Amino acid sequence: MYPMPALMGKWIAPLQRTNQFVVERVEQWTALRMDSLRAYVDLGVAQFKVALKVTDPHGLHEVADSQCAVLSFVGHRMLDDGWMLAKWSADGHRQADRLARQNLLGLLFG
């Protein structure tokens, strides 16, 4: 039977590794989402600036035509963001599984 301090010591390292993993994953997720948000905000601001410059029907027609390109960009960006998030999620699952195995083996045989 382990004395209480030794037992607590066995649990501290796995908890620290798990907490570090969670913090890293949250930081990565935040960076991914902020990058996407920044791209969408920049696009929105650019479109607003273009719309403010419309002074005649011809300019309005050009802005309306350019919206097709903008919608195409947004659609592709959303697909890219989805794939990036899916890859991030799968990678996180693999890392969490590896960490859980490492922690369990350390607790059982360490």
Image (spheres, grey):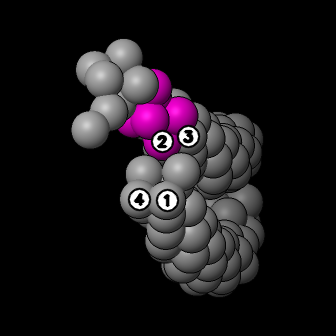
Residue 91 rendering spot, x and y as whole percentages = 61, 73
Q: Which mark is in front, 1 or 3?
A: 1
* In the foreground, 3 or 92: 3
Cβ–Cβ below 8 Å for labels 1 and 4? yes
Label 4 – label 3 distance at C-alpha: 16 Å
Label 1 – label 3 distance at C-alpha: 17 Å
* Circle 2 SS class: helix
Residue 40 rendering spot, x and y as whole percentages = 60, 52
Label 2 – label 3 distance at C-alpha: 5 Å
Q: Which mark is in front, 4 or 2?
A: 4
Q: Which mark is in front, 2 or 1?
A: 1
Amino acid type at mark 3: Arg
Cβ–Cβ below 8 Å for labels 2 and 3? yes
- Which of the two discs, 4 and 2, labels the residue nearer the N terminus? 2
Label 1 – label 4 distance at C-alpha: 4 Å
Label 2 – label 1 distance at C-alpha: 13 Å
**Image: magenta residue range:** 8-14
* Circle 4 SS class: helix
| Residue found at x 42% / y 51% | 107
| Residue found at x 57% / y 69% | 98
Q: Which residue is mark 3?
A: 17
Q: Which residue is mark 2?
A: 14
Amino acid type at mark 2: Pro
| Residue found at x 41% / y 25% | 6
Label 4 – label 2 distance at C-alpha: 12 Å
| Residue found at x 41% / y 59% | 108
Magenta run includes residue 71: no
Residue 10 rendering spot, x and y as whole percentages = 44, 35
* In the foreground, 23 or 54: 23
Q: Which residue is mark 1?
A: 109
Q: Which residue is mark 4?
A: 108
